[in-house]
Amino acid sequence: MTLPPPPDPAYRPPESSVPGGTQPPPPPPSYHRRGRAANGGHSVVEGAVRGSQVRTEYRGERTSEVIWTLRVETYDTDGNLFSVVPVEMRGQTFEGSVGDGDWVRARGRMKSGTLRPTELENLTTGAVMRVKGVPRAALVLAWLFMAAVVGFIVWGFVTVITGGPEPPEFSAPW
């Protein structure tokens, strides 16, 4: 009778972090960079999404901000968990979506240990999640309106200070 070989002492069974016992697919090569010299102060993180949450904060009666928080788990080339990076996106509304288990790439600035991207690429679905703000046309119109109002106010002050033009004389008989 022959015995099977002893188990490899370096072998560890994979730990499942997903409910139901399913293991996420092996990750593609990932990277996690920080530093100002290499990429202009932006950090890039790529990995699996965990703990995705959306909340709304209200500031005053009419102002609200949507906050999307998640954690990105990065893996080494062997598929072992390398690091967990907290990610937070803030804006009025969002375009696109992301969910737990999706593979994402985010670029942004690190602030207090949290990555703050304005855009997040969902590599699982091919979608791009981005902060959606006020359309550019509306911003241009608002700036033009504000310039007209300021011009009118300046014209009023100049007219008052300089005395303005003399009113026309009416020589019509009454």
Image (spheres, rainbow, N blue to C red):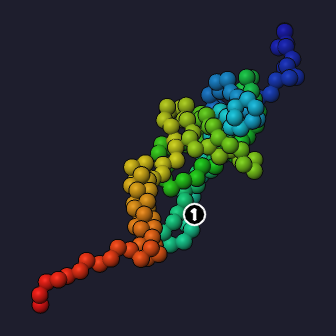
Quarter location, residue 154: bottom left
Q: 163 or 105: nearer the eye?
A: 163
Q: In which quarter of the image is the C terminus?
A: bottom left
Q: Residue at x 71, y 44 (%)?
A: 110
Q: 57 or 70: nearer the eye?
A: 57
Q: Residue 50 in the image: x percent, y percent?
A: 64, 43
Q: Residue 16 in the image: x percent, y percent?
A: 69, 36
Q: Residue 4 in the image: x percent, y percent?
A: 82, 14
Q: 12 or 50: nearer the eye?
A: 50
| Lateral position of residue 107 relative to residue 165, left or right | right
In this orientation, does residue 35 appear?
yes
Q: Is residue 18 above or below residue 12?
A: below
Q: Quadrant of the N terminus?
A: top right
Q: Residue 149 in the image: x percent, y percent?
A: 41, 65
Quarter location, residue 59: bottom right
In this orientation, does residue 19 appear?
no
- Residue most extreme to the left: 173
Check disc 1 and report the residue beneath it: 57
The amino acid sitting under disc 1 is Glu
SS type, badge 1 = strand
Q: Which residue is drawn at 50% across and 72% down?
A: 61
Q: Which residue is drawn at 60% across and 49% down?
A: 89
